[in-house]
């Protein structure tokens, strides 16, 4: 028998309420900061060849036209115009560890970040789709444009995820995307990356065909434990419980060191997969996080 929620428990917001709140608190500020330039966050899914010109020292050697270079005995590079049509996919981790945190939790921050980015992309007339996953594909929303598509994604994200008895394995998510997404796209992998090892291999294969951005959702309590005395900690993935004394300074230091090693491991895996990794904390300002991501992506392109 299901136990009804307390009378004072906050009601789950509707997709319209989530989008209206983000339009007011996030999108209005982004319009002022980015000046409507959604392309500072995303770019087209392809390049159209337009012309040849002499090679310059700062040019990317991958754009050298070797046939023309050999024929004229002078290095030439191909010039491209970026395709402005963007198809974006969100690969969304809905595993148990994403429920961690207070207000907002990691799941709430994931919803806000994805809805805001989807809104930003569709404002440029582009299409967004989503693959919701919890060790198996829960839902696939084919790419569409417009406000209704953003609401559709929000509705699925506000639905409680199904329970998975196995530990999270993001490699399975990468493999599902490899078989599901055919057209070259911009792909956001949104997760806390609490997972079994080996996830970087399928994402590396994915990045050969698509532009892949990893958004890691974190909570400060996962990195630094507060001094709160004796408490029961539970692994959200396995349900295993452990009684710990957080007033023990040595224990807190070991916890922080383990978190540091985990952070470094995730960064190394992202580098091996050749994907762009950004972190968003549950105590971050979402506008600042998106603007920082846009600035970093502009810098990487240069």
Image (tube, grey):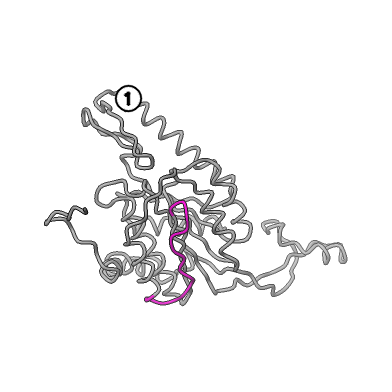
Q: Nearer the viewer, residue 183 or 252?
A: 183
**Residue 285 against residue 20 in the figure, above or below:** above
Tell me where residue 121 appears, x and y as whole percent: 44, 70
Q: Residues within 10 Å of mark 1 (few under 14, many from 20)?
A: some
Is 173 situated left or right of 80 in this image? left
Residue 198 sits inside the magenta stretch: no
Examine the image and state in which quarter residue 11 appears: bottom left
Q: Which residue is mark 1?
A: 251
**Residue 44 against residue 231 in the figure, above or below:** below
Examine the image and state in which quarter residue 80 appears: bottom right
Residue shown at the point (72%, 67%) measured from the top left: 78
Q: Nearer the viewer, residue 60 or 161?
A: 161
Residue shown at the point (38%, 42%) measured from the top left: 237
State which region is magenta. 134-148
Is 228 situated left or right of 39 in this image? left
Examine the image and state in which quarter residue 231 appears: top left
**Residue 57 against residue 233 in the figure, above or below:** below
Tell me where residue 63 appears, x and y as whole percent: 71, 62
Is 15 situated left or right of 128 in this image? left
Q: Residue furthest left?
A: 7
Q: Nearer the viewer, residue 120 or 133?
A: 133
Q: Nearer the viewer, residue 132 or 34?
A: 132
The quarter of the rendered structure image containing the C terminus is bottom right
Residue 138 sits inside the magenta stretch: yes
Tell me where residue 89 appears, x and y as whole percent: 49, 64
């Amino acid at each position: 028998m299901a136990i009804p929620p307390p009378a004072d428990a906050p009601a789950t917001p509707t997709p319209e309420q989530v989008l209206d709140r983000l339009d007011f608190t996030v999108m209005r500020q982004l319009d002022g900061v980015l000046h409507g330039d959604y392309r500072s966050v995303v770019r087209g899914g392809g390049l159209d060849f337009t012309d040849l010109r002499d090679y310059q020292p700062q040019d990317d050697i991958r754009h050298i036209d070797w046939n023309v270079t050999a024929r004229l005995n002078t290095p030439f590079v191909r010039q491209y115009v970026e395709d402005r049509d963007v198809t974006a996919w969100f690969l969304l981790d809905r595993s148990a560890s994403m429920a961690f945190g207070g207000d907002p939790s990691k799941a709430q921050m994931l919803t806000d970040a994805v809805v805001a980015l989807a809104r930003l992309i569709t404002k440029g007339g582009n299409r967004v789709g989503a693959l919701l996953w919890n060790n198996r594909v829960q839902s696939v929303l084919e790419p569409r444009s417009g406000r209704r598509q953003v609401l559709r994604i929000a509705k699925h994200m506000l639905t409680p995820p199904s329970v998975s008895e196995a530990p999270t394995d993001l490699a399975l998510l990468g493999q599902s995307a490899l078989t599901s997404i055919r057209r070259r796209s911009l792909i956001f992998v949104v997760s806390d990356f609490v997972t079994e090892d080996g996830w970087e291999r399928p994402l590396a294969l994915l990045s050969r065909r698509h532009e892949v951005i990893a958004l890691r959702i974190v909570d400060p309590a996962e990195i630094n434990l507060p001094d709160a005395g004796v408490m029961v900690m539970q692994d959200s993935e396995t349900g295993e419980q452990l009684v710990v004394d957080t007033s023990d300074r040595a224990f807190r230091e070991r916890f922080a060191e383990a978190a540091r090693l985990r952070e470094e491991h995730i960064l190394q895996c992202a580098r091996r997969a050749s994907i762009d990794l950004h972190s968003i904390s549950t105590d971050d300002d979402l506008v600042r996080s998106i603007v920082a991501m846009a600035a970093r992506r502009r810098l990487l392109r240069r």
